Image: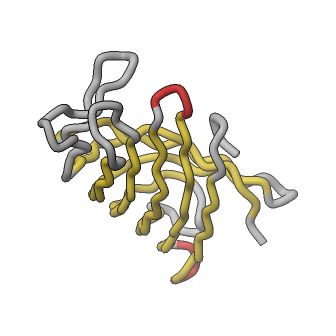
Amino acid sequence: MIFGFPVFGFGVIQNNGKNELHFGAFYYDEEDEHYNEFGGWLGYRIYKNGKGKGLFYGVGFGVFYTNWDYEGQSEPVNSILLLPNASIGKRWIWDNGLTFAPFIGPAWEIGKVEANDGTIKSWEDGSKSDGGFEPNIGFSLGYMF
């Protein structure tokens, strides 16, 4: 679990550690906002020095199904959002197989969460789920075997 929602990811290192194909899924539920989403992603990373560690850059693509229980509407608002992204980062691997890989890059959300009356889902910080640029910042913590 990360920040209260379950995340699953799996990657396959190929070509003597020069490339990685990874995929994952998550579920997010924000009870106070009457909102939840389920999504998955597929990504591809290239490691500069191989061995699945060190500096990497990559691209990815996510698909998210959202459900918003909007008070002004009798039926929930359901949307599908697409999220192409890119990243650069660095992976460390310890002798016991533990890995840590922070990354950063741009992402572009395609789609929006919009009720029938035109209301766009907004968040406590003032941002809205109306598509457009957003940062792709995060880290992966895992185990290599």
* Observer-nearest of 55 and 79: 79
> Total label count?
0
Task: Using the image, determine if residue 74 lies above or below residue 62.
Answer: above
Task: Using the image, determine if residue 75 lies above or below residue 117.
Answer: below
State left or right for residue 136 relative to residue 52: left
Give the quarter of the image for residue 68: top left
* Observer-nearest of 123 and 49: 123
Task: Using the image, determine if residue 75 lies above or below residue 12.
Answer: above
Q: Position of residue 137 (x, y in %)?
A: 43, 38
Q: Residue at x 24, y 48 (%)?
A: 109
Which residue is at the far top? 125
Q: Position of residue 102 (x, y in %)?
A: 54, 42
Which residue is at the far bottom? 15
Q: Residue at x 38, y 51 (%)?
A: 66
Name the colouring of the figure: secondary structure
Q: Residue at x 49, y 74 (%)?
A: 21
* Viewport quadrant of the C terminus: bottom right
* Observer-nearest of 118 and 39: 118
Q: Position of residue 27 (x, y in %)?
A: 56, 53
Q: Residue at x 30, y 17 (%)?
A: 126
State left or right for residue 29 relative to residue 99: left
Q: Position of residue 93 (x, y in %)?
A: 71, 54
* Observer-nearest of 86 and 134: 134
Which residue is at the far left? 118
Give the quarter of the image for residue 4: top right
Which residue is at the far front? 74
Give the quarter of the image for residue 121: top left
